[in-house]
Image (spheres, rainbow, N blue to C red):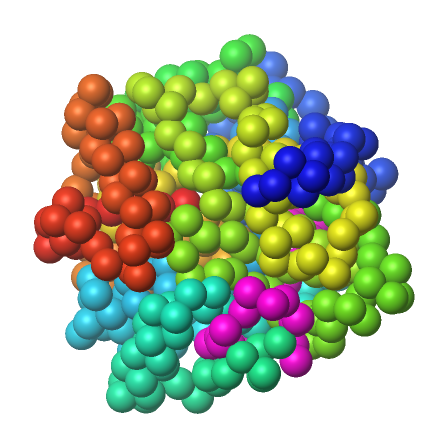
C-alpha cells in the first residue's frame, strides 16, 4: 500500500479503544459472587460462554427439578462469546463444503439439524426476552478474485444437486454490489436463511439471566482447577472450594480441558477485529447494505464483516495467529500490526468510506481442531461430557453441542448421538515443535494459494487427502 494510504489507515485507528466493542456496554451485568466452600448438585457446568450457558439452560428446560450449578473462571461472556463477530450460523459443520467433504452421507440430516437449531435459538431469544439485536439476514460469501467465482458456482451447483439450495442465491457482480457496494466484489453466494446477525455479548448476558431465572446457581470468577471422579460422582476443585456433582459438562473450549487427554485435539488461534464509528446517512447510502446481510470473502485468509444495530461496520479476520506451544495470554489479545493490516484492507474494500474511524480494536482466542467443526464425547465412565473445536462458528453450533452433551450424560440414544460426526473424533495435533511448524507451513501455503488463482500446492493437497487443516 502507498505511504499516504498507510498513513490514512493508521490515522483511522488513532482513537480506537483496545477493547471488544460488545463488552464496552453499560448494559454489562455485574458478576455473580465467587464460589467459596463446598457445593453439591446434579449437574455442574464448567464454563460461562455459549457452550456452558446453553447446557445449563437446556438442562433446566428438560428437567426443571434438576439441580444445576455453572462456574466461570472470569465473567460470563468474557472470552470468545463476547468478542466474536456476531454471526450466528445454522451450519454445524463449518460450512456446507466442509460438511460434504467429511460427512457426505449425513449432510442432509446435518443441514436439517442445523436449521432446527438456529430456529430454536431465535425462539429462545424471543421467549426469554433477550435483547441481542437478532436479525435473520443471512450471509453472502463474496468473490474478490475470478477463481473464487468458479468456486462459489461449483458450491451452489453441488448444493442444488443435493437439494440444499432452497435458500441460497448465486449473485453476479451487479447483484452483490446492489446489496453491499465494493469495487472489489465480483459476485457472491447468499445463504438467505442460514445465518443471523446478533450482539454476541448481549446474547451471553441474556442467557445468563435466563439461567438464573430458571434456578441455575451461577458462580463467576471461579476457576475450575482439577476434576476427579469415583463411583458416586465427580468432584471439581476451584480456587476457593469444591463442587460435588453427579454429572459434569465441560464447556471450556479454547482453555485447557480438565480431561487432559483432550488437550491435543485443539489449538488456540488468535483472531482480531475492528469496529467503526456509526456511519452517517451519506456513508450508509454509499455502501448500501439494504438487507443487512453479513459478509465474508472467499479467500483462504478471509475477512468477515457486518453492519451493527447502530450502523457501525465490524471488520475482522485475515490473520489467524498461532503461538508456539499454544500459548494463551491477555497480552496476545492485541496485535497492532494486524489492526493496521485490517484497516488497510478495509479501505481497499470500501474506498468510498475514506476518513471513517475505528472506535474499538480487539482480539481473542478461538479453539480450532483439524476438522474445523466440533467434536464430542464422554470421560470418567460417562459422568463427564465435553464439546470443543467449534473453530469460530460456535455462536450457533454451541447450542447443538449442549444438546449432545446432555444426551450423552443422560445416556440417551438420539438422532444427534447417532451421527457419525458425533461418534467420531478429529485427528489430534502433533506435539511441539511439529505442531507449530506444520501450522506455519499450512498458513504460508494457503497465502500462496490465494495469490496463485486458488491453486493448492503439494502440501495442501496432502493435508486435504489426510483430512487435516488449519482455520479460524
Answer whether residue 64 is visible to the viewer in this image: no
Give the residue drawn at x 14%, y 53%: 461
Answer whether residue 188 is visible to the viewer in this image: yes
User: As rendered, which of 445 and 266 lies closer to the eye?
Assistant: 445
User: As rendered, which of 306 and 33 lies closer to the eye?
Assistant: 306
Give the residue drawn at x 37%, y 64%: 95
Which x, y percent locates residue 359? 78, 39
User: As rendered, which of 322 and 417 lies closer to the eye?
Assistant: 322
Position of 323 relative to 109 (above/below) = above
Which x, y percent locates residue 50? 54, 46
Residue range corresponding to the magenta coloring: 178-203
Which x, y percent locates residue 132? 72, 56
Which x, y percent locates residue 227? 35, 22
Give the residue drawn at x 80%, y 48%: 355
Quadrant of the frame with the C terminus: top left
Position of 321 relative to 131 (above/below) = above
Residue found at the far top of this picture: 240
Position of 156 relative to 327 (above/below) = below
Number of numbered discs on residues: 0
- Tell whether position 360 is magenta: no
Quadrant of the frame with the N terminus: top right
- Tell whether position 192 is magenta: yes
Give the residue drawn at x 33%, y 32%: 267
Amino acid at each position: 500500500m502507498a505511504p499516504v494510504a498507510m498513513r490514512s489507515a493508521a490515522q483511522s485507528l488513532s482513537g480506537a479503544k483496545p477493547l471488544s466493542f460488545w463488552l464496552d456496554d453499560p448494559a454489562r451485568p455485574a458478576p455473580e459472587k465467587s464460589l467459596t466452600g463446598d457445593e453439591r448438585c446434579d449437574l455442574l457446568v464448567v464454563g460461562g460462554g455459549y457452550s456452558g450457558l446453553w447446557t445449563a439452560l437446556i438442562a433446566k428446560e428438560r428437567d426443571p427439578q434438576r439441580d444445576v450449578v455453572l462456574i466461570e473462571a472470569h465473567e460470563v461472556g468474557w472470552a470468545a462469546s463476547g468478542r466474536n463477530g456476531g454471526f450466528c450460523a445454522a451450519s454445524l459443520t463449518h460450512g456446507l463444503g466442509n460438511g460434504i467433504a467429511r460427512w457426505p452421507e449425513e449432510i442432509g440430516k446435518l443441514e436439517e439439524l442445523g436449521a432446527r437449531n438456529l430456529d430454536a435459538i431465535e425462539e429462545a431469544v424471543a421467549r426469554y426476552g433477550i435483547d441481542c439485536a437478532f436479525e435473520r439476514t443471512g450471509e453472502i460469501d463474496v468473490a474478490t478474485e475470478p477463481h473464487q467465482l468458479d468456486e462459489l458456482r461449483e458450491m451452489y451447483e453441488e448444493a442444488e444437486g443435493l437439494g440444499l439450495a432452497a435458500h441460497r442465491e448465486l449473485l453476479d457482480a451487479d447483484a452483490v454490489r446492489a446489496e453491499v457496494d465494493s469495487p472489489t466484489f465480483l459476485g457472491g453466494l447468499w445463504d438467505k436463511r442460514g445465518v443471523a446477525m446478533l450482539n454476541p455479548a448481549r446474547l451471553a448476558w441474556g442467557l445468563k439471566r435466563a439461567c438464573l431465572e430458571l434456578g441455575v446457581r451461577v458462580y463467576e470468577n471461579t476457576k475450575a482447577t482439577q476434576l476427579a471422579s469415583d463411583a458416586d460422582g465427580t468432584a471439581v476443585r476451584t480456587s476457593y472450594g469444591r463442587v460435588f456433582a453427579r454429572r459434569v459438562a465441560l464447556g471450556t473450549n479454547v482453555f485447557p480441558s480438565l480431561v487432559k487427554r483432550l488437550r491435543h485435539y485443539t489449538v488456540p488461534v488468535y483472531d482480531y477485529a475492528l469496529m467503526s464509528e456509526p456511519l452517517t446517512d451519506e456513508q450508509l447510502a454509499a455502501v448500501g447494505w439494504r438487507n443487512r446481510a453479513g459478509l465474508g470473502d472467499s479467500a483462504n485468509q478471509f475477512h468477515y464483516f457486518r453492519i451493527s444495530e447502530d450502523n457501525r461496520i465490524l471488520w475482522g479476520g485475515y490473520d489467524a495467529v498461532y503461538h508456539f506451544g499454544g500459548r494463551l495470554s491477555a497480552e496476545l489479545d492485541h496485535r497492532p500490526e494486524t489492526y493496521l493490516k485490517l484497516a488497510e484492507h478495509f479501505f481497499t474494500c470500501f474506498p468510498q468510506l475514506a476518513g471513517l474511524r475505528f472506535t474499538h480494536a480487539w482480539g481473542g482466542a478461538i479453539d480450532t481442531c483439524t476438522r474445523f467443526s466440533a467434536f464430542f464425547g464422554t470421560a470418567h465412565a460417562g459422568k463427564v461430557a465435553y464439546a470443543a473445536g467449534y473453530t469460530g462458528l460456535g455462536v450457533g453450533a454451541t447450542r447443538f453441542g449442549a444438546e449432545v452433551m446432555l444426551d450423552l450424560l443422560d445416556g440417551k440414544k438420539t438422532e444427534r448421538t447417532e451421527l457419525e460426526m458425533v461418534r467420531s473424533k478429529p485427528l489430534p495435533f502433533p506435539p511441539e515443535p511439529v505442531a507449530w511448524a506444520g501450522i506455519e507451513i499450512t498458513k504460508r501455503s494457503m497465502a500462496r494459494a490465494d495469490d496463485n488463482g486458488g491453486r493448492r500446492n503439494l502440501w495442501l493437497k496432502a493435508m486435504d487427502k489426510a483430512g487435516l487443516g488449519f482455520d479460524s
